[in-house]
Image (cartoon, rainbow, N blue to C red):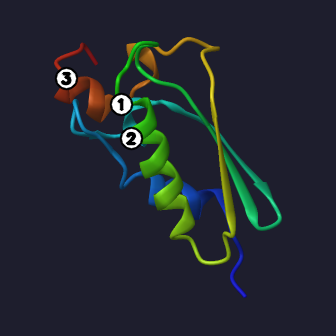
Amino acid sequence: MSTITKDTIWTKLSGVFDPELNLPVTDLGIIYDIALENDTVVITFTLTYPGCPLADLLDKEIRKAVHRVEGVKFVDTNLVWEPPWGPDMMSETARFSLGYEI
């Protein structure tokens, strides 16, 4: 039996790319929390803007990636708007890729 860790979940999430920006959701800074509850993982995330038409797609891809972790039976997602997302939440790599000052 494997042990589910936040690091393992984070690694899987780093393979989920925002289709518009072509950057991992982890680098975009939209993953706010990973909660482990036995064989259930709860991912709290946001979007880069409230009207984003990719909300359902990102939710589906996040769930699919987390389900790939051995031992995970259930994945819940929690889409939140607080704190509001901003470019300062992105990794240095993402800011550089999108032309923001580092």
Query: In this image, 98 relative to 84: left or right?
Result: left
The residue at the point 53 percent across, 53 percent down is 63
Quadrant (top left/top right/bottom left/bottom right) for the N terminus: bottom right
Badge 2 is on which residue? Answer: 57
Q: Work out whether residue 87 or residue 50 is closer to the camera in this orientation and state it.
A: 50
Mark 3 to mark 1 CA distance (whole Å): 19 Å
Q: Position of residue 45 (x, y in %)?
A: 57, 32
Query: In the picture shown, does residue 98 fall above or below 10?
Result: above
- Residue 21 placement: quadrant: top left
- Mark 3 or mark 1: name the one nearer the start of the chain: 1
- Residue 25 placement: quadrant: top left
**Residue 86 at least partly seen:** yes
Q: Are marks 2 and 1 in contact (CB under 8 Å)?
A: yes
Amino acid beneath label 2: Leu
The kind of secondary structure element at disc 2 is helix
Closer to the camera: disc 2 or disc 3?
2
The residue at the point 35 percent across, 30 percent down is 54
Badge 1 is on which residue? Answer: 54
The residue at the point 49 percent across, 16 percent down is 85
Residues packed near mark 2 inside 10 Å, few (<14), some (14 to 19) or many (20 plus): few
Closer to the camera: disc 3 or disc 1?
1
Badge 3 is on which residue? Answer: 98
Q: Position of residue 80 (x, y in %)?
A: 63, 23
